[in-house]
Image: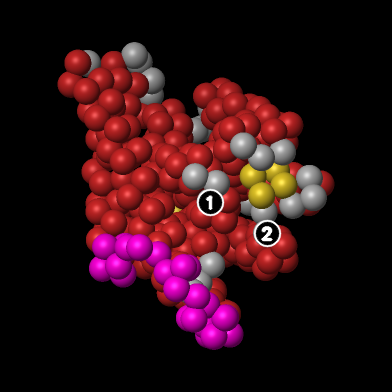
Amino acid sequence: MVWATLFLSGGLLLLWRGADFLVEGSVGLAERLGVSHLVAGLTVVAMGTSAPEVAAAIVATVTHKGDIALGNVYGSNVANLAMIGGIIALMRPLKVGATTLRREIPAMLASTLLLWPLLADGVLSRSNAILLLLVFTGLVFYTVRTACIAATASWRETVSDATIAPPRTVGRDVLAIVLGLTTLAIGAKGTVGGAVAIGSRVGLSDAVIGSTIIAVGTSLPELVTCVVAAIKEHHDISVGNLVGSNIFNALFVTGIAGMVHPFRVTSRFAGGMDFWIMITVAGLFTAAACLGGRVIRRSSGGVLLAVYIGYLFYLLRSTDPA
């Protein structure tokens, strides 16, 4: 128990420091390359903070535990929008850009809904996995291409202004990103390992640990990164990280798991209760942004966090939490 507590504490410290490096490096690199903070959040930050989900999904499918792989995706997506989104909004109202509401959030909703027909028969085949990865590749290509066009259009306006150049070099920004991602990975592993050990000691079943601690644990990089970004008032990094991570989880994590090993899932994930909870939470997040005038206010943050607490109660009371 002592070692588990040390791993948990040390992991949390590494997560915080890693998030600090990642946010600083991503913001600096985005400014130097002339792309928006939102694009950095949707790509580099979102993919980096979702690395634990990829590792967990691959391990689960190789060991023939498809429900754990998909449960981690669903649980992480709910945690991103309800738990993390709620916490960030309670800390500081979260601003959502007009472009994000018009383009990235609909892409997140569509990516999540795409899982419904593909999992209708309770099996994710390799052909379905390839389709998910192709859609993901197309979205990334579109996002990067749009960012490059915008950067090129604004280049003449910024190149002559010597005061806008970030003091850091590109090399230092890239090094900060790599260091941040590495530290996040180590911190997440230590935190999850310590939490699982503590959960086992207090008598939680493997199913409950997987549906709660593992899902929340693999979302810790997103949580800490968004908290750091919110404190520094980089709202686009926070929103881009949350929305981008959910797209990444639904398309890439699920797709890569199915490519490694096709897997079966129970009905709760194939259009059942867990699937619709994930869709409902995504809808609530979108509604909160629209009703708040592109700002997720503290009241909406409280609602989102309350929904997540209710989701945890559902998981703990579920007779089939796998």
Q: How many marks?
A: 2
| Location of residue 269 in the rendering, given as x and y in whole percent from the top left corner | 56, 48
Is residue 26 toward the left or the right of residue 37 in the image?
left
Residue stretch rendered in magenta on the structure? 151-173
Q: Badge 1: few (under 14), some or many (20 or more) residues near its Cα, within 10 Å?
A: many
Q: Is residue 141 above or below residue 226?
A: below
Q: Secondary structure at mark 1?
A: loop
> What's the mark number on residue 97?
2
Q: Nearer the viewer, residue 157 or 85?
A: 157
| Location of residue 302 in the rendering, given as x and y in whole percent from the top left corner | 68, 29
Q: Secondary structure at mark 2?
A: loop
Q: Is residue 315 above or below residue 240?
A: above
Q: Quadrant of the N terminus?
A: top left
Q: Amino acid at mark 2?
A: Gly
Q: CA distance from mark 1 to mark 2?
A: 12 Å
Q: Amino acid at mark 1?
A: His
Q: Nearer the viewer, residue 57 or 304?
A: 304
Q: Main secondary structure of the magenta part?
A: helix
Q: Residue at x 66, y 49 (%)?
A: 95
Circles 1, 2 touching at the beta carbon (< 8 Å): no
According to the image, label 1 marks what residue? 234
Q: Residue at x 37, y 46 (%)?
A: 19
Q: Nearer the viewer, residue 158 or 23?
A: 158
Q: Residue at x 58, y 85 (%)?
A: 153
| Location of residue 158 in the rendering, given as x and y in whole percent from the top left corner | 52, 77
> What's the mark number on residue 23?
none
Q: Badge 2: few (under 14), some or many (20 or more) residues near its Cα, within 10 Å?
A: some
Query: Would residue 90 be visible to someone looking at this image?
Result: yes
- In magenta stretch: residue 157: yes
Q: Residue at x 49, y 81 (%)?
A: 160
| Location of residue 276 in the rendering, given as x and y in whole percent from the top left corner | 67, 46
Q: Is residue 251 above or below residue 84?
A: below
